[in-house]
Amino acid sequence: MSLKHLILGCLLDHPSYGYKMLRNIYKDFFGLAPEVNDGQLYTLLNKMEKEGLITRYTVHQDKAPSKKLLNITEKGRAEFLRWLMSGEGENESVRFDFFNKYTFLNKCNFFNYLEPREARDKLSKQLELMESKLENLQKARNSMVQKAVQTHRIRILDYGIEVQKVKVKWLKEMLQFYGGEKHYD
């Protein structure tokens, strides 16, 4: 998803203020904002406003600085729906995207240069990290359910949880391969 379309989708949900809109869509998943710097975001917002996809208007506040509220225009809505119905980004062009998106696999590709003990140590540390990440994803899911987040957004997180479970299982199997003493299910 391009940042432009993410912004338009956020604004379809409701008008928002600059960076807050991106934090809102990600808070259900991670509690963190995406890695987008202010310069990148506000440059894009200015461009989108010039293209007529969004509008800004000032909201005056008592005892606080005025804020610029962003809203999607009809042209922006049409562009978002065009993108949503299109096939853009749905045909993954990278044959081995799982390999490129999980850097640890690049290191595993060269474990033949490590002693088995060194490989086990790296795998153990990675397993600990991935189990922690899985636990955090499951906590995020529980929080989403409690907050009555839209079911389709919870199902997106379910996908991430399943991917994380596969990583944990694979790491356990790799530990066994490298002579790890523990036997995992």
Image (cartoon, rainbow, N blue to C red):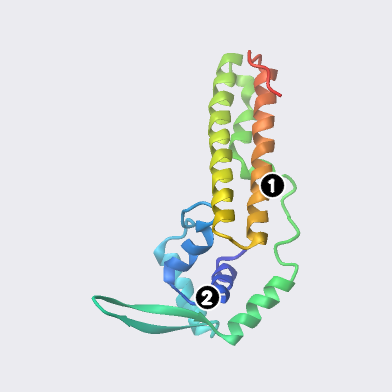
The amino acid type, in three-letter code, at marker 2 is His
Is 70 placed left or right of 89 in the picture? left
- In the depicted structure, whether residue 94 falls above or below residue 75: above
| Residue at mark 1 | 97
Residue ID at (46%, 78%): 70
Asked which quadrant contains residue 4, the reply is bottom right
Residue marked by disc 2? 14
Q: Position of residue 24 (x, y in %)?
A: 49, 63
Task: Measure the alpha-carbon separation of dots 1 and 2.
Answer: 33 Å
Which secondary structure lies at badge 2?
loop
Q: How would you rate the neighbour count of disc 2 (Cα within 10 Å): few for under 14, some for 14-19, many for 20 or more?
A: few
Q: Residue at x 61, y 15 (%)?
A: 116
For label 1, the SS is: helix
- Based on the displayed image, in which of its 4 quarters is residue 164 positioned? top right
Residue shown at the point (59%, 54%) measured from the top left: 145
Question: Can you tell which quarter of the image residue 69 is in?
Answer: bottom left
